[in-house]
Image: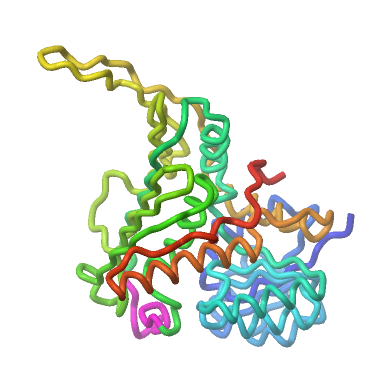
Amino acid sequence: MAVMKLAVIGCGGMSRSHLQGFKDLGDRLRIAALVDVVPERAAGASELFPEARVVSDYHDILTEVDAVLLSLPHHLHHPIGMDCLNAGKHVLMEKPLANSEAECLELIELAEARNLVLLVGYVMRYNALAVEMKRVLQAKTYGDVFHVSLWTEQLTIVNKERMPWAADHRLLGGGQLFSHGCHYIDLLLWYLGNPVEGTHLGTNFGTPWMDWEGTSDVSIKFENGSIGYHMGTWGARGSRLGYAFHAHCTEGMLEADIRNGSLILHRHIGLHKPGEPERTEPEELIFQAPIGKNTACQMSHFLDCVQKGTPPLTSARDSLQSLRVIWRLYEAERAGKVADLRGLGLVDQRDAPPS
């Protein structure tokens, strides 16, 4: 099988650890070009890939590569993505796909017309712990799931001079929910199925650098009666949960500790009877995931899609559905209503983890 030549366009958003993971795919992947308008960022990445060509204009390398990874400010996803697809390149687009429905549809329709892979970087769906949680819930190992809560607490202070686009909703596409929470709306749809209705409350209190929300609370009801909840903030000065998923099932509660890769079963609460002590059972570790392999697994899947014709697990059409949920939640919040989310389930509900 031929080695795929990849250009990374936008080196500022790719951490050194993410890029390091691509080295494990050396028998299938070659980083042929590093592109950034800030030469120092591309030069820093070139320490890991000294054979890569370093340029500041992506037009200079489109004839030299098979595919591109776009890690750019959100408002640039559409124009640069369209240029790459028009040049016949497969695209791994970091989330979100684009800032409007019309832009998303243009990217999707062009990729489909040219038979090119357009995979969206919802990297949490390539996290072994998140995948195992999906498998356990789908198998009803601990009964029916009736509530899933996804907590993401971090401190992300946007430097408006260095990254003016990241605090401007017109360029970011929204606030914290759109920029980061899109990962977790996608996961809720993947875990729980077709949404029915939902609410969003957001605020920039505590995150004054954001002109839209820096903290979000989302509640969604699904066709099967379950509830999905996502709390995300860029203003956490301290945290106990950090990144944690909780799934309440009829025979126990699952806790996924994302940072430690642990899936834990809790079943210590018995039927409460006044005057009697609670039943106590130790928590049980039921799965331990490897840490820090998300982006490498995602890239491996992207290679499979290009080289073997595998359909993308995180397709652009699925991505559009989760963004449509967010846009409806925003619209309903402004109107002071509950959002009608019917018809916005994922196009592809495959349960199998990526190869």
Residue 94 horizontal side relative to residue 225, left or right: right
How many tags in the picture? 0
**Residue 313 location in percent, x, y?**
66, 53
Q: Is residue 167 magenta?
A: yes
**Residue 57 location in percent, x, y?**
66, 87
Q: Is the stretch drawn in magenta largely helix, strand or loop? A: loop
**Residue 302 location in percent, x, y?**
71, 58
In this rendering, is residue 64 above or below 47? below
Q: Nearer the viewer, residue 107 or 194?
A: 194
Residue 145 horizontal side relative to residue 138, left or right: left
In this rendering, is residue 92 above or below 128? below
Query: In the picture, which quadrant includes the C terminus?
Result: top right
Q: Residue at x 46, y 57 (%)?
A: 185
Q: Residue at x 65, y 50 (%)?
A: 297
Q: Is residue 313 magenta?
A: no
**Residue 167 location in percent, x, y?**
36, 79
The segment highlighted magenta reads 157-169
In this rendering, is residue 140 above or below 202? above
Q: Quadrant of residue 275?
A: top left
Query: In the picture, which quadrant includes the N terminus?
Result: bottom right
Q: Residue at x 57, y 71 (%)?
A: 97
Q: Residue at x 31, y 70 (%)?
A: 333
In this rendering, is residue 6 above or below 28? below
Residue 201 horizontal side relative to residue 169, left or right: left
